[in-house]
Structure formats: C-alpha cells, structure tokens
Amino acid sequence: MNIAMAGIDHHRASLQLRERFAFTKAEAAEALSRLAEQPALEGAVLLSTCNRTELWLSCAEGAALDPAALLGALKGADPADIPFAVRRGRAAVDHLFALACGLRSRVFGEDQIIAQVKGALALARSCGSADGVLDRLFLSAVTAAKEVKTSVRLTAMDSSSASRAADLICRHFPDLKGLPCLVIGNGEMGRLAASTLVSLGCRVEMTVRQYRSGEVKIPAGCRVIRYDERLQGLARCRALVSATASPHHTLRYEEAAPVLADGAERVLIDLAVPRDISSRLGALPGVTLYDIDDLEGGGEGEARRQEVARAEAILQAAADGFCDWCDFRPHLPAVREVAALVADDAAARLERPIAKLAAGPEAAAELERRARDACEKAAARLLYGLREELDRTLYRDCIEALRRSARPRGE
C-alpha cells in the first residue's frame, strides 16, 4: 500500500487560504488530467469542499511522490509556505475513514461529507484517475461512514451547515414564521438551506440561473426567481443564504450596498468557498454577515465521547479490512495461478470419466467446463481462507510454494 495525501482544512488554514486552494468541478478535472502525467503515479483523487482541499495519491511500490508539492503546484504555490497536513499509509487511511463520517468536520457529524467523498471519487473515475486502490479506499470509507450513521447517534449528527445557518438566523429573528428569506444557489447546499427555512415557517425565495429541459429541483414551498433578480430579492428579504459553486461573488459590494442602504436589519450567511458575498457588506448598518467559519459544531460531553468511541471502533474495523485487502492484493496473481493449475489438473483427471458418462462431445465439453470452474473456485476459496490462519510472511511463503509445486515439471 503506497497511499499518500496532502491537504488543508479549517483547523490549519484560514478561510482566505482555503479559498485560494478551492477547486470547482471543472478545475478539479483539469488538475487530475495534469497529475496523470506524473511518472509512478497510479491514481489520484481531489477532494475539495468548503472546509478542506485534499489531494490523494496512489503510487507504484517504492515510489516517493510528494503530495504537498503536487497540490501546491496545482495552485502555483510553494508548499513550504502552506500549512499542508501530509499523511501516508495507515495514517492516511484512518484519516479518510474519520473524515467520511463527519468526525473531522466543522459541523460535527455532518451528513454532506459522505456525498462529497463519493463525488470526489466519481469525478476521479470520470477522469480515469481512480486506480483500484483509491477506488476501494474511498468506497470502503463511504460504506463505513454509512454504517456509523445508521448505528451510532453522534451528538450533532443531524446538524449540517444548512441547519446551523437557520440557527444563526433564529438568533436575530426568534419568530421565523413568515420571515422573508432568499437563498442564492440551487445546488445541494442551497436546497438543504431552503428546505430547512421552509420547515421553520419562513417565506423563502430561491434563485435559479436557468431551466434546463425543465428539470430543476425546487424544494417544496419555495418561490423561484431568476438569478439576475437576486438584488430585488435582497431588497425584499430579511435573511439571505448564498451557497453556490461560483468562483465569483454573487453579491458584489457595488451592486448590493445601495440595496442595503435602507438600514433594515438583515442577516447574510455565506456558505460558499470561495465566498459568494463581499466581506465589505458586513460593515453596513443593520447588516450581519456570517461565513462558513462562523458555523461551529456541537459541544463535548461524556455521552458524545462514548458515541465517538463506538464510531471509531466501527471505522477501525473497516480500515483494518481495507489494509488487509491491500496486503493480500500482491498475492492475487499467485492465488489465481494456483487455482487455475488445480483446475487444469482436475480436468485432465476427469477427462476420461466425463467422456464415458456424457451423452456426446458437446455434453462432455460442458461437463468439463463446469468441473473446471468448480475446482478453480473451490481452490481459490481455500487459498483465500488461509489468510485468516497464517501471518503475512508465512502466507506469502505458502502461496509461493504451492505455485511452484502446482506448475508442471520443467516450467
């Protein structure tokens, strides 16, 4: 297993630095294509969310690629100037498993990170950069995270950036019933925010850039306005949430300041990285501006610590399983060869009995095929099972000895 990662997150980097290293989907695809030119690189996945950017690499055995240098180069930065966290091997594996179920998130135990990890893998697959090792790693992490979600009740597990945004709005407007709100962005985060506000009784408008074949998902209870009508919507609203993947501001100071000059109390919540809303707007009278770094997770406590321990036990077992798979992977060719040689030997021994019993050449060929297949599967199952009984070195020696003994003499 030669896995390495480098990244920054909300623990190590400011929002400004995270903005610098944010990747849109198109930028991430381009970056993965550039990385494919690296010698000894077998796979790469790029995970970019509001709170973190991480580059994951799978390298040829013995290769020593520097993930921090590669990630820095993608953004034209010297890695010595960036507080990258670099992890390799088991430390990297454990990190991804914890990350996927929200243990490393700003909003503790959040649900969206599972979809983000799945999305990073899907993009890498579409770019052809996800090799078998990273594919298995990310799928294993997602599967373990789902098990944690269904079997462990983490404190604040039902929290998300969307629900935290609603909490912030409620601080300023305790009675949310009928409160006019605007949500800019029709992506997953925007829809979650809109649905949450509607469920609390708010009167919600949501921007949509354009309808494509009439297939735009709009949460129930929301009124749709065009994206270019957002300033009119800003004038009507008392609370605004912006959550787009745009590299540019959705609310520029020059455009929004005149609208906000009426002095009415408004709460603006920016859930995007890079930021959607000009920070200068937060200095205007009556305006309170929050960004993603203002969202905090749940508190500590004995109950939470116990649930975290249960989650970590699940993750530990799943990570052990992945590492066992990695350790076994180099032996697969030998196992398959031995199983095939056993099947060949059995088929040769059964050739005459099958010919006598079968009703014609076609039936004999079918019986021989089935016998060969059954022998090969049975032998492979036994060889796989040996992993549970022998230590790694002895298992390797046994498989190699079996391969030598099963080969026809003279080979």
Image (cartoon, rainbow, N blue to C red):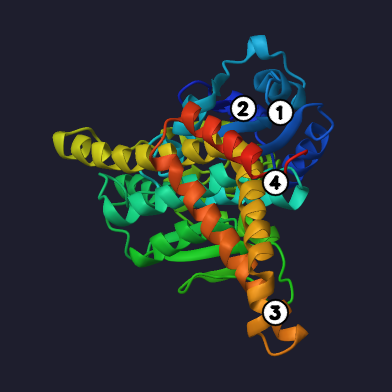
Distance between the alpha carbons at the discs numbered 1 and 3: 48 Å
Amino acid marked by disc 1: Ala
Check disc 3: other Cα within 10 Å, few if <14, some if 14-19, many if 20+: some
Amino acid marked by disc 4: Ala
Q: Is residue 350 visible?
A: yes
The answer to whether mark 1 and mark 2 are in CB contact below 8 A is yes
Amino acid marked by disc 2: Asn
Residue pointed to by mark 2: 2
**Secondary element at tag 3:** helix
- The image shows residue 15 at horizontal and vertical percentages of 55, 28
N-terminal of the two: label 3 or label 4?
4
**Secondary element at tag 2:** loop
Residue pointed to by mark 3: 355
Please state, as top left, top right, bottom left or bottom right, where the N terminus lies in the image: top right
The answer to whether mark 3 and mark 2 are in CB contact below 8 A is no
The answer to whether mark 1 and mark 3 are in CB contact below 8 A is no
Does residue 15 sit above or below 172 in this rendering?
Answer: above
Distance between the alpha carbons at the discs numbered 2 and 4: 18 Å
Residue pointed to by mark 1: 60
N-terminal of the two: label 1 or label 4?
1
Quadrant of residue 343 within the rendered picture:
bottom right
Left or right of 370? Residue 192 is: left
Amino acid marked by disc 3: Ala
Check disc 1: other Cα within 10 Å, few if <14, some if 14-19, many if 20+: some
Q: Residue at x 66, y 54 (%)?
A: 340
N-terminal of the two: label 1 or label 3?
1
N-terminal of the two: label 2 or label 4?
2
Residue pointed to by mark 4: 124
